[in-house]
Image (cartoon, coloured by chain):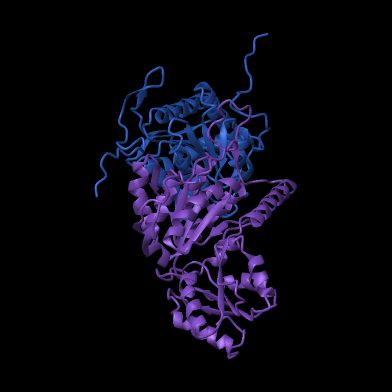
Chain colours: A purple, B blue
């Protein structure tokens, strides 16, 4: 049974969810707009007997994550875009050493120091690598404070299950907004044995080693192929998305994640009042990406076009186009610099697509 | 026949890849012997770094974690905070610790992380073929200081033990070398003392071990030992820089000596202030 709902800020819910998921390690460095995660952890993590360290840098924080994960403990760090860039070295090592870790990115506008307002410009960084080498992170994009709570708990299970980084990607809007959230009495925490952990031999005839270095090219190639096999399993089993108004022959399909999906949801109703049937596919996992859902939509005879809405210059649109595979045009509406699109901007674009007044062309 | 000398159980059977005359083999053995002497092989966790010692995780027989360049003290922090009763140490070279990893080592010491750092200083980057290190001596020729290190051009060497000992969080800092029997025994005493400091939760400890790099110094092994004695010890005097007065009883229990106030990284929570 769900308990009564409480009004909480997104960032605080991230911290609360982590503690509820059994995470007893948080290492971080202050950066706007995610610092409430850290404030909450500074008190609550210590109160529940866990470890909270304000690290000297994001680089140090992710390496503390690496250490705690290597010793077999649930661990999380959080940051925002420039700080996540700094963590990429560590995230690559975590991938190479196959360690479970949860990394939260409350994205702000870039590039460079950019601004502190919401953005989705880290889509490429999160889903296409970010650090060096061939690796993947599971990337999850919640769209509400309630979903943030549930998916942060799930992120720890996925990280442990696949021994990889599970990244929660939000933005300044989601982190800063307050919404009601209903906490479960008991969390679905999956306890997974970690016989590989370096926490002392404790009677084993061998010593446990956690490493990402393989000097012999044949050995390293084999290691890489094993990673790729694992990623295939994740792709086969962990794709999550939400279909909205997709079962009554929509004409235009919006693709949007997180905050943009919240704004676009209202536009669906407004467009339908104008007689334009609009549906939406909202990827919840950005990697693995729901290519099949997009492909199926592209095959629907009713669907004339996709409209991809993002807080960037067009990043997820590349995956939408891969899914659509040229079968239907993919239009774009994006805002940059920390601005959010107004519902009317999106609606106007839908009308223009409907009336054939714009061409697919560039991103804008 | 009585066995008078045998391999320590603290090392695996994997052959070292180190060059002839390099001190890493001796220092590895001292660390490994200390783990065995203290019955810590089953519980200890070591952190290997980047450089010639990247592979130390395969040589030392306790659980080992290989860290990114310079980040070993942060990795050790993540481990030690969870395994408060296990011996946790890093094994780092001078490029790793004193150049790319300065932030991590300074803040681990400032927080008085209850870890032990074995810092091997050979005044040069070994693995990447002899570039100038932050510890390279004035006048020393390296592949990136081909005319010798010139302070007006490349600045001065960093004396790690001296500067870390100024941090209130550092409990024990000592510099040793392993050029001869007497010094090897002294180095082993220092590593054992660092172990005791950590076991008694007294805070951050670091043993700097001056080391040779015959390959990149362009010297025969014995000549390298002589060069270390004649040149490195002038820049890096041996001795205890912090915690000289800390004493332990025969069982390794803390007896006396000044220690940092915040030495065991535990917050006494009680009521949290709003």
Residue at the spot 63% in from the left edge and 57% down from the top edge: A133
Q: Position of residue A279 (x, y in %)?
A: 56, 74
Give x and y (percent) for residue A263.
46, 74
Residue B96 versus residue A318: which sits nearer the camera?
A318
Residue A316: x percent and y percent?
58, 70
Q: Quadrant of the C terminus of chain A?
A: bottom right
| Residue at 37% over, 53% down | A38
Q: Is residue A237 left or right of residue B88?
A: right
The correct choice, above or below, for A188 with respect to A282 in the image is above
Which is nearer the eye, A289 or B97?
A289
**Residue at the extreme top:** B1
Compared to A260, does B226 lie above or below? Answer: above
Kindly indicate the quadrant of the structure image that contains residue A198.
top right
Q: How many marks?
A: 0
Q: Would you place residue B160 above or below residue B146 in this image?
A: above
Which of the 4 image quarters holds residue B240?
top left
Tell me, yes or no, if residue B137 can be seen here: no
Q: Viewed as shown, does residue A16 lie left or right of B28?
A: left
**Residue A127: which quarter of the image?**
bottom right
| Front-most of residues B209 and A123 | A123
Q: Position of residue B118 (x, y in %)?
A: 49, 36
Q: Is residue A49 left or right of residue A268?
A: left
**Residue A62 visible somewhere in the drawing:** yes
Give me the residue at 55% from left, 49% from top: A159
């Amino acid at each position: 049974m769900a308990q009564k709902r409480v009004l909480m800020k997104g960032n605080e819910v991230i911290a609360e969810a982590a503690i509820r998921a059994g995470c007893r390690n948080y290492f971080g460095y202050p950066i706007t707009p995610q610092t409430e995660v850290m404030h909450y952890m500074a008190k609550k993590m210590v109160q529940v007997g866990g470890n909270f360290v304000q690290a000297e840098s994001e680089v140090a924080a992710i390496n503390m994550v690496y250490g705690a994960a290597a010793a077999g403990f649930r661990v999380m760090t959080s940051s925002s875009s420039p700080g996540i860039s700094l963590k990429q070295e560590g995230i690559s090592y975590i991938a190479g050493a196959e360690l479970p870790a949860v990394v939260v990115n409350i994205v702000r506008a870039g590039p460079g120091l950019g601004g502190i307002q919401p953005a989705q410009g880290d889509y490429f960084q999160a889903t296409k690598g970010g650090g060096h080498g061939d690796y993947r992170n599971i990337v999850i994009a919640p769209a509400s404070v309630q979903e943030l709570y549930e998916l942060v708990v799930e992120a720890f299970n996925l990280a442990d299950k696949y021994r990889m980084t599970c990244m929660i990607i939000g933005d300044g809007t989601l982190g800063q907004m307050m919404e009601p959230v209903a906490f479960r009495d008991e969390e679905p925490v999956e306890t997974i044995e970690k016989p590989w952990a370096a926490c002392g031999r404790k009677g084993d005839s061998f010593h446990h080693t956690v490493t990402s270095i393989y000097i012999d090219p044949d050995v390293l190639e084999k290691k890489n192929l094993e990673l790729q096999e694992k990623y295939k399993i994740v792709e086969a089993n962990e794709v999550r998305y939400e279909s909205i108004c997709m079962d009554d022959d929509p004409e235009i399909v919006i693709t949007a994640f997180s905050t943009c999906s919240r704004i676009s949801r209202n536009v669906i109703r407004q467009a339908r009042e104008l007689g334009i049937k609009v549906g939406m596919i909202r990827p919840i996992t950005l990697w693995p990406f729901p290519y099949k859902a997009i492909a199926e939509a592209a095959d629907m005879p009713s669907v004339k076009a996709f409209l991809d809405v993002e807080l960037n210059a067009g990043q997820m649109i590349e995956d939408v186009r891969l899914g659509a595979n040229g079968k239907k045009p993919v239009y774009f509406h994006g805002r940059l610099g920390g601005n959010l699109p107004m519902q009317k901007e999106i609606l106007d674009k839908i009308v223009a697509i409907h009336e054939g007044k714009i061409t697919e062309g560039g991103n804008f | 026949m009585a066995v008078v000398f045998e391999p320590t159980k603290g090392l695996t059977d994997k052959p070292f890849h180190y060059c002839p005359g390099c001190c890493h083999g001796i220092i590895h053995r001292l660390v490994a012997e200390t783990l065995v002497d203290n019955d810590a092989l089953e519980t200890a966790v070591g952190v290997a770094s980047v450089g010639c010692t990247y592979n130390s995780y395969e040589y030392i027989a306790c659980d080992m974690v290989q860290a990114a360049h310079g980040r070993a003290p942060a990795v050790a922090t993540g481990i030690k905070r969870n395994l408060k009763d296990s011996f946790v140490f890093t094994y780092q070279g001078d490029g790793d610790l004193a150049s790319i990893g300065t932030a991590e080592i300074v803040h681990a010491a400032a927080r008085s992380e209850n870890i032990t750092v074995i810092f091997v200083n050979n005044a040069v980057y070994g693995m990447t073929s002899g570039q100038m290190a932050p510890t390279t001596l004035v006048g020393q020729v390296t592949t990136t200081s081909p005319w010798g290190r010139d302070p007006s051009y490349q600045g001065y060497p960093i004396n790690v033990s001296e500067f870390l000992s100024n941090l209130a969080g550092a409990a024990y800092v000592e510099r040793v070398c392993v050029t001869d029997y007497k010094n090897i025994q002294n180095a082993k005493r220092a590593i054992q003392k660092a172990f005791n400091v950590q076991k008694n939760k007294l805070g951050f400890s670091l043993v700097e071990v001056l080391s040779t790099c015959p390959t990149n110094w362009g010297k025969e092994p014995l000549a390298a030992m002589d060069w270390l004695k004649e040149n490195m010890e002038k820049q890096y005097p041996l001795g205890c820089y912090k915690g000289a007065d800390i004493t332990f009883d025969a069982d390794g229990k803390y007896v006396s000596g000044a220690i940092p106030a915040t030495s065991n990284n535990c917050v006494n929570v009680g009521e949290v202030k709003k």
